[in-house]
Image (spheres, rainbow, N blue to C red):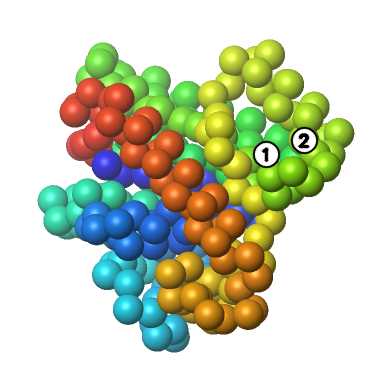
Amino acid sequence: MVIAVSNPKGGSGKSTSTLILATHLAHLGASVCIIDADPNRPIQDWKIKGKSNSTLTVIADVNESNFFDVLDAQVPHFQFVFIDLEGTASFLVSRAISAAGLVIVPVQASAIDVRQASKAIKIVQDEEKAVRRFDSTRSILFRILMTRTPAPGAPVSASQKELEQDLLAAGIPRFQTTLAERQAFKAMFNLRLTLQELVGDKRAGNLAAAYENADQLATELVALIAQQPEAAKEPAK
């Protein structure tokens, strides 16, 4: 399954969401690759400069001209291919979305994030129309993923409640699991390790809660993919 992670707004949690999901799925035994298409290469930096023993594969030498060649070379070898996209609308972003079976749109509970997320959804819808010119059965699934939310039991902001209501009223699908604001998720990038490799490190904070959060999101993702027809799991040609 090809999974693009996209939102034109930088800082929405794209790279964090991608790394959490990809490393957790790899830890569970899946074969996972990330194509790091963010010009800042945060996940490539995590892989190259860190000492993680994760089986996760990271590829960063990708651009508009070689994107499909790079993607096609990975798909036969991995159960999950994540594409971490840049925080802007571009030709590369459009290509990645057109090839995806699922697009994850991370958003924080702020008006500006929601406005930018709506642009990402519009790109998904436009690319779906384009690919349907060649395959009328082709669809591109998408889900909003709320990030940096309060930990379970903590007060929820009015803006988050309003966002959840707006998404429901508009019929926009989202993950029921949110990614909470966790010190462990920051520590993954700071220390360049997986959640599992942070065991015993006090800088990870409440690691058990972070692990549970990651596992719930990964479980929901796998269940969502399992419901899709096999054709939807293959990249567009």
Is residue 60 positioned above or below 150 on the image? Answer: below
Amino acid type, mark 1: Gln
Q: Quadrant of residue 133?
A: top left
Q: Residues within 10 Å of mark 2 (few under 14, many from 20)?
A: some
Q: Position of residue 77 (x, y in %)?
A: 15, 56
Which label is found at residue 84? Answer: none
So how many labels did they put on this image? 2
Query: Alpha-carbon distance for marks 1 and 2?
Result: 16 Å
The residue at the point 34 percent across, 23 percent down is: 139
For the C terminus, give its image quadrant: top left
The residue at the point 43 percent across, 76 percent down is: 197
Q: Position of residue 91 (x, y in %)?
A: 45, 46
Amino acid type, mark 2: Gln
Is residue 96 positioned above or below 54 on the image? Answer: above
Dot 2 lies on which element? Answer: helix
Dot 1 lies on which element? Answer: helix
For the N terminus, give its image quadrant: top left
Q: Which residue is mark 2?
A: 160
First along the sequence among labels 1 and 2: 1
Front-most of residues 94 and 215: 215
- Specify whether residue 127 is in view: yes
Which label is found at residue 116? Answer: 1
Q: Position of residue 35 (x, y in %)?
A: 35, 60
